[in-house]
Image (cartoon, rainbow, N blue to C red):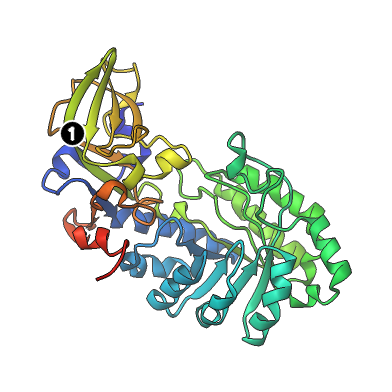
Amino acid sequence: MAGDKRPPFAALNTEPQVFFAGLPTPCYVLDEGQLRRNGEILAGVAERTGCKMLLAQKAFSNFNLYPLLAPYLAGTEASGLYEARLGAEEMPEKEVHVFCAAYRADEMEELLRYAGHIVFNSPRQLLKFGPMAKAAGKSVGLRINPEHSTQEGHAIYDPCAPGSRLGTTRAQWEQAVAEHTELPDLLDGLHFHTLCEQDAEPLRETLDAVAEKFGDLLPKMKWLNFGGGHHVTRPGYDLGLLESCICRARDEWGVQVYLEPGEAWALNAGYLVTRVLDVIQNGDTKIAVLDMSAACHTPDVIEMPYRPPLYGAEEAGVLPYTYRLGGPTCLAGDVVGDYSFAAPLKEDDLLVFGDMAIYTTCKNNTFNGMPLPAIYTRREDDTFAPLATFGYADFKCRLGSK
């Protein structure tokens, strides 16, 4: 597949190496036009089905661009106190939903100032904090585990894998209710999140499992949250099947349906621009050391693992010149991956990674004292605007104070 035909670069109308040449490296570039196009797709689903779309801030939390997305979404989803506060402050007219695997007692009072919906992970947490949330006028939910896995490999990342800490199984619920009969009265809704970068067919399978395991509870609920992991804005995604799943839940159980995608809002809406600092030959392996770090600037590359798309490059061995791309840190595993190119790489060459708006700016770090990349926006008129720049103080302030 040619580099300029890949979806991550479809929004560019010129050679990235030329288009981004005037920017400092490394830097992230967030594409306002592509964010808007993603928002239009998601809003279309909401309009046709009556569901509500939330922005999962864990994937994209560049709040300066929230006004661009606000017309298309119902609110934000948070994973804890700080994200809940961010959503409430930056989109005060929108809903704030929060889910956390376990809440801290010393944060709950403040959290309830920001969140309108709060989802608990276990009956124990529901029992501990649910009455307080209800007394504060909040809508209370429970994350369920339908025990239906639709992912292959990397079981540690699968919320439905055996031994998962995420969500309450039906057996766990039954045991808890037998001991605490007041639990059902605390609930306004149920939440499940079992997908990761998947199409609508796994959602259909999951919804069947939810109906089998928890269908008797759902008519008593006000809402059902389908969670995230829906690649709604990916080319070829089955929007019709997604919409039929939403309508099924709405009509069968009489619930307000929520979705909380993260990636879908910012899919293919960002770039990471970097330069080659050095080229090394070690045995048969050619290595290009970049001024970006996989460990620091694209941590999902190492954590997931994940191989980001690179403009003009292919899998190793496809094109004549193959290089291992790595960062400048001391970590031996600071490697993006092996890519092939039509021409040899040389010092100062500009490279552009795609799909870099998600899980980058919100997850990066300063390991080894690596500077954080600046963040720019690409406006819809093809001009750039600086969003944030970072320096030594951003590294030092995380480690102590004077």
Q: Amino acid at mark 1?
A: Val
Looking at this view, is 7 or 329 the one in front?
A: 329
> Which corner quadrant of the image does residue 171 belong to?
bottom right
95 is higher (above) or lower (below) than 209: below
Looking at this view, is 228 or 369 the one in front?
A: 369
Q: Position of residue 169 (x, y in %)?
A: 76, 55
Instruction: Determine the residue located farthest toward the right in the rendered image.
Output: 178
Asked if residue 12 shows in the view, the reply is: no
> Which corner quadrant of the image does residue 332 belong to?
top left
Does residue 180 appear left or right of residue 206 in this picture? right
Local secondary structure at mark 1: strand
Does residue 78 appear left or right of residue 217 in this picture? left
Does residue 331 appear left or right of residue 164 in this picture? left
The residue at 86%/74% (across/down) is 181
Label 1: how many Cα within 10 Å (few below 14, some 14–19, many 20+):
many
Does residue 85 appear left or right of residue 34 in this picture? right
